[in-house]
Image (cartoon, coloured by chain):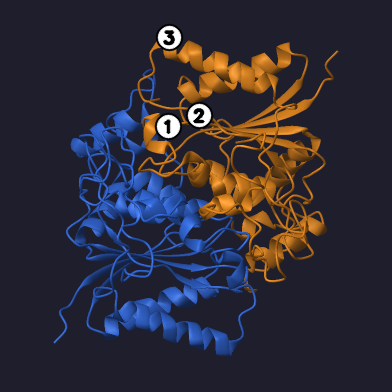
Chain colours: A orange, B blue
Amino acid sequence: MKSMKKILIVSAHPEPRSLNAALTTFAVNHLREAGHEVRLSDLYAMKWKPTVDADDYPDHHDPARRLHVMADSEQATLEGRLAPDITAEQEKIRWSDAVVFQFPMWWFGPPAILKGWIDRVFTSGFAYGPEVPPPYGEGSLGDGRRALLSVTLGARETSFSDRGIHGRLTDVLHPLQHGLFWFTGMAPLDPFAVYDANELPEDRFEAARQTYARRLDTLFTAEPIPYRSLTGGDYDHDMRLLPERERPGTAGLDLHVLNPGIDTPHC
Amino acid sequence: MKSMKKILIVSAHPEPRSLNAALTTFAVNHLREAGHEVRLSDLYAMKWKPTVDADDYPDHHDPARRLHVMADSEQATLEGRLAPDITAEQEKIRWSDAVVFQFPMWWFGPPAILKGWIDRVFTSGFAYGPEVPPPYGEGSLGDGRRALLSVTLGARETSFSDRGIHGRLTDVLHPLQHGLFWFTGMAPLDPFAVYDANELPEDRFEAARQTYARRLDTLFTAEPIPYRSLTGGDYDHDMRLLPERERPGTAGLDLHVLNPGIDTPHC
């Protein structure tokens, strides 16, 4: 018997009849049919405010005073005085056992409305800290919370392959996978990607749905990406990877993955 | 005698008394004193709308019709029917000989308001295309236009070094440097970065200004990052780097830089 889990899906596309919206609806239904509880933050439908500004700290901000984004957002978080739209999203994340982001890749990153959800919601005092150094694997949002990126891309798959000109998808998504999820303690999974997504014929859409279903079915059992922990003994006090921790020939962002290569479950 | 150039600075910080605002003002003044013409897009002051939606194509969008972001933005671009705030920014880019982005790194990327400037302004038909494949080095915004990222980071420099846990700054900025600037034909320079920027004492701020001045003085003479061109013979028809083009031991995103290592001006 599978246990019921709680999943937050955050979606970011302006068109309710888009492929992204269809994948969101598919995921909501598929997870609910499996017995899970699902909440959805449809950012365009919510008219989510993307910009960090002084209105995010309403009881706190004195217009004559200089706004320090980091310090002011931390203080407002710790004192429970963030804008209500932010605290509502923080509550959803705290509630969740897994977070799924559904978005089209625009200029090699999330749409601005989703970047603004990250900028405003993941405050110090909520997503990490307030103490330093950054947690990486042991953050406030840990406790086994899973994180899955589900992205659509106009480009062909080879162009995001290991030698593809756009860069490996893993490297392009590193700011979210490692910089956001792993930084805050979540367990990021391999992303789910639909390529050639500008014109997707029905048979390829059906294949994508089936693949996505399998990914959703293993949301809580798949092996997360084995990023290195900051406190696991691999880094020095300046947060640099110690010499000779990596397998010979490893370079680039793979340095921060434990044993990338043939002998790990992930690779 | 130096020739006068045209520079567009795009800045993204909510606080006019912030370090980012100070660096923006410094750059505007320094470049003007050197005889250049400078225009500034201060996105917070402009109350820039970050979200792509149907309002971006005002004469064109039928609410009953499904919005196809890529196709509709391209058509509106080619027919001159984009929203006026978008065309005003496109005109500034076309006018410029160099583009400078000034922003604080939030979650390993630009603030949402700047991401939304990119999402909305860099349409197909303006920044690339409408033909495929993607240009990379020969795009619509080429002709030697320089591109410089000027970023502030709360973290210490070692944590963004080659073995730093956050990933090498070059890799973290790859979506902008290679995915945006190089993709559209601009010549990206090494980024200018101020670390430990949450609390910057006056002497370090003065040192940062001096370093930044030198970077601005060489905006048109510094060697751009020597990314590979898509049509230069290094990639196959599936946009993968051909075998053995790279120096042995090169991996990760460095694959897409010509001869990374000791014998290039950049490295």
> Which x, y percent locates residue B196?
61, 74
Three-letter amino acid code of the residue under disc 3: Asp
Mark seen at residue A265: none
Q: Is residue B135 left or right of residue B28?
A: left
> Which x, y percent locates residue B186?
27, 57
Can residue B48 be seen here? The reply is no
Closer-to-camera residue (A177/B44): A177
Q: Which of the chains bears the disc numbered 2?
A: A
User: Does residue A62 sit above or below B227 in this rendering?
Assistant: below
User: How far is disc 3 from disc 1 in space, using C-alphas?
Assistant: 17 Å
Can residue A15 be seen here? The reply is yes
User: Does residue B66 sit above or below B238 in this rendering?
Assistant: above
Please tell me how many numbered marks the rendered image carries.
3
User: Does residue A103 sit above or below B249 in this rendering?
Assistant: above
The earlier-in-sequence mark between 2 and 3 is 2
Mark seen at residue A153: 1
Residues marked 2 and 1 touching at CB (< 8 Å): yes
The earlier-in-sequence mark between 3 and 1 is 1
